[in-house]
Image: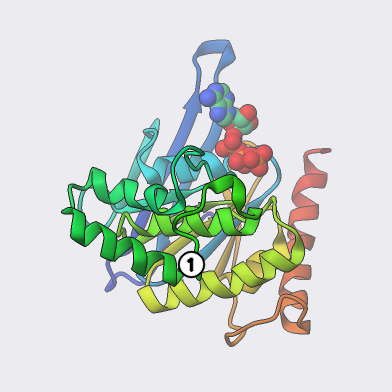
Amino acid sequence: MTSTTTTPSSVTPAVALDGVTKVYGRGAQAVLALDGVSLDVAPGEFVCLVGASGCGKSTLLNLVAGLDRPSGGQVRVAGSEQSAGLMFQEPALFPWLTVAANVELPLRLRGLPRAERKERVAELLRTVHLGEFGGRRPHELSGGMRQRVALARTLALDTPVLLMDEPFGALDAMTRDILHDELERIWSERQLSVLFVTHNVREAARLADRIILLSSRPGRIIYSTRVDIPRPRRIDSAEVAAIAAEVTDRLRTEVGRHGQ
Ligand SMILES: Nc1ncnc2c1ncn2[C@@H]1O[C@H](COP(=O)(O)OP(=O)(O)OP(=O)(O)O)[C@@H](O)[C@H]1O
């Protein structure tokens, strides 16, 4: 069993969780969501977090994003004030704004001058292959395209760390497959550190440098495996299937232990 997973001490991690505990509520109503989680994400590393429903995956991402504070332990994200961008299963775009205006929002909030904003938006839309769609409204786009817009908007934050909470969970398999390729390209080009939550073990084996398995509540790290399959990978390859089978076995044992 692995309760701690860290990077070598010579490298400053992009994300470092040290003995992180999260309790929701108080007294008899208290829920221990995370219990003593220690985890480092190295610069440029792609880490996937998997676990049964309710094991605390979203809680962990929210703590790294700074949306909530741990009850115990420490969360550190390398870099300046806002170092982690967060993306969800729902694209959460403003429906009354164009695609370009949605992507521009974080740039406005960062106070970038207008000309620079326009240039950055055009570059970001090209990055996610939506260069021609800046003038559309979100309802005119497919689900996959909307997630591309959400990704461009998250990239507009210019953070070295990308936090993704089941970003492709609502998409069909083909669209998801294409977005895996796109995300892998962007991650590698921009040398991002990614913490990616998914229920889909194959998706984790397709994308991750390292897969971390959380136990059912309270969330503790119970297993961690490095994925050394060369990139680019195929989700339907035998190597990805073999890693996915290994992680699924661990997950099954864990879920069975809790009678879920
Ligand atoms: N604000 C809250 N108040 C009380 N309990 C909460 C709160 N938020 C989450 N929880 C509980 O903490 C535990 C972890 O929740 P969390 O949403 O992090 O799990 P998850 O692994 O992301 O779940 P899922 O896979 O279903 O999205 C769950 O048991 C949940 O019910």
Q: Nearer the viewer, residue 121 or 53?
A: 121
Q: In the rendered image of this protein, does residue 44 appear above or below residue 5? A: below
Considering the image in quadrants, where does the N terminus appear?
bottom right
Examine the rendered structure and indicate whether residue 51 appears above or below residue 63. below
User: Which of these two is toward me, 198 or 103?
Assistant: 103
Task: Tell me the element at label 1.
Answer: loop
**Colouring scheme, one of rainbow, by chain, secondary structure, one colour:** rainbow
| Residue 104, percent from left and from top | 33, 51
Question: Residue tagged by mark 1?
Answer: 132
Residue 113: x and y in percent read 16, 54
Circle 1 residues within 10 Å: few <14, some 14–19, many ≥20: few
Q: Is residue 116 left or right of residue 57?
A: left
Residue type pointed to by label 1:
Glu
Q: Residue at x 57, y 85 (%)?
A: 231
Instruction: Residue at 74%, 55% (x, y): give it.
Output: 251
Any part of residue 207 in sight:
yes
Q: Nearer the viewer, residue 99 or 194?
A: 99
**Ligand number 1: quarter of image:** top right
Tell which residue pokes out farthest to the bottom in this image.
Answer: 230
